[in-house]
Image (spheres, grey):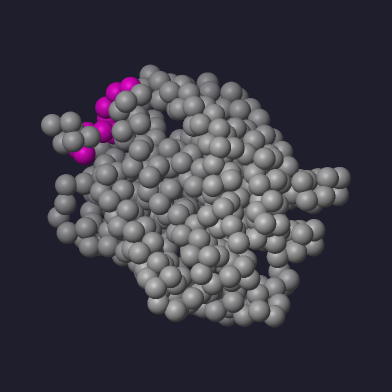
Amino acid sequence: MLKKRLDIIQLSDHFDYKRLLRFTFPSIIMLIFTSVYGVVDGFFVSNYVGKTAFTAVNFVIPVLMILSSVGFMFGTGGGALIALTLGKGHREKADSLFSMLLYISLALGILLTVVGLLFLRPIFTFLGAEGALLKDCLLYGRIILPAIPAAILQYEFQCLFATAGKPQLGLYITLAAGLTNAVLDALFTAVLPWGLPGAAVATAMGQCVGGILPIFYFARPNTSLLRLTRARFDGRALLKICTNGSSELLSNISSSLVSMLYNVQLLRYAGEDGVAAYGILMYVNFIFSAAYIGFSVGVAPIIGYHYGAGGFGEMKSLFKKSLKVIGAFALLMFASSLLLARPLSLMFVSYDEKLLAMTLDGFSIFAFSFLFAGFAIFGSGFFTALNDGLTSALISSLRTLIFQVASVLILPLIWGLDGIWLSVVASELLAALTAAAFLVGKRRKYRY
């Protein structure tokens, strides 16, 4: 009975802590499992192929994230508008918006794949890759790029499953995609001698499971709030979706560009070892940030629904509960990152004592960023749910671009390699303060 209730009427319910966590948990796990793709690749590549190939994976991932980031934009921006539309009782219009997004995403994904293949070599050459590192970057990138359309859809569905009232089903599909990637990674690199190409094929196939399989569900009659139908192009709605989801687009593009900048700085201050150490820290950051993003994605359709329905009392309750949940996550992740630093590092670089020591030093500083990151991520997602794309974009761009770039360029001049690790902490603290200012300043306008 509880499962049925959660599946059908969850957006209009009153949410206590238990119901809030039950509803957002699938989204959290979905985002975590998606972030594990790169981690799984990194583990097998580092241990079974080598350090240079591992560095190459860390060079390629930011490029892939830039190309697939439109999925986050359509997923969050579209999910917010669709939830608002459902809250107003316009079911057919919601289906049309949902369908239009999927068709546009497929077409755009194909275009981005072609562009990525054309500019792959110039990008990695510009970033400083040469010799064996450049060869591995091109090898990995050319194999995985054709899966970009599926990756875009996968990121999109992670948001839209919650909007459709089926977060559990979205979780199951993401689990299937993650397991596909992990099993094939082990088979292609540890059992079969396919090396770096095998890791790329495994990730691409996992993304296809997560991005293509949901289409078959939504194309058939189903029990969710959404269905794939014929769509009428709505330029005005598309502009609203893009504007509303621009914060997530900017966040992902900015994060990827900043990761490239970090790689350039680390090559300068610590060589390939620095890039490898940063890669391990980023894997932990991907997983922990995914928990924050997953919670924000999970709670967004509830906020959007009640905002559209005029349920301001429930919005206020959700806002307060969400801040407390984020605070609890922050303490848990900070403690976990300190406790797990050594075992996680040993998983990737137990074969190199110097690289291990560098990674552990980075962890001791980097861990403090988890105390602040969740508040900025939630703040941006909260305004996206309210269809205030401009405020959301400001928070995201300041967090993932302006503060990060300034920090990573200035702090290493003072503290060297430690300054690079510290720059992440400084930028997250500044972003959390910025989000707090907007949340306080706009509470009367949106009545939360």
State the residue lying farthest toward the right: 414
Between 190 and 315, which is closer to the camera in this rendering? 190
Image coordinates of residue 447 in percent, x first then y, are 47, 22
Residues in magenta, as a range: 7-16
Q: Quadrant of residue 83?
A: top left
Residue at 69% over, 80% down: 131
Q: Is residue 110 magenta?
A: no
- Position of residue 257 relative to residue 393, above or below, is below
Residue at 34% over, 29% down: 20
Decide if residue 110 is in sight here.
Answer: no
Residue at 30% over, 28% down: 19
> Which image quarter holds the N terminus?
top left
**Magenta span: chief secondary structure:** helix
Between 159 and 365, which is closer to the camera in this rendering? 365
Badge count:
0
Image coordinates of residue 398 in percent, x first then y, are 66, 43
Residue at 70% over, 45% down: 361
- Position of residue 149 relative to residue 82, above or below, is below
Q: Quadrant of residue 193?
A: bottom left
- Horizontal arrangement in the rendering, residue 412 relative to residue 111 (left or right): right
Q: Quadrant of residue 341?
A: top right
Decide if residue 303 is in sight here.
Answer: yes
Image coordinates of residue 87 in percent, x first then y, are 30, 35
Image coordinates of residue 78 in percent, x first then y, are 40, 49
Q: Is residue 11 magenta?
A: yes
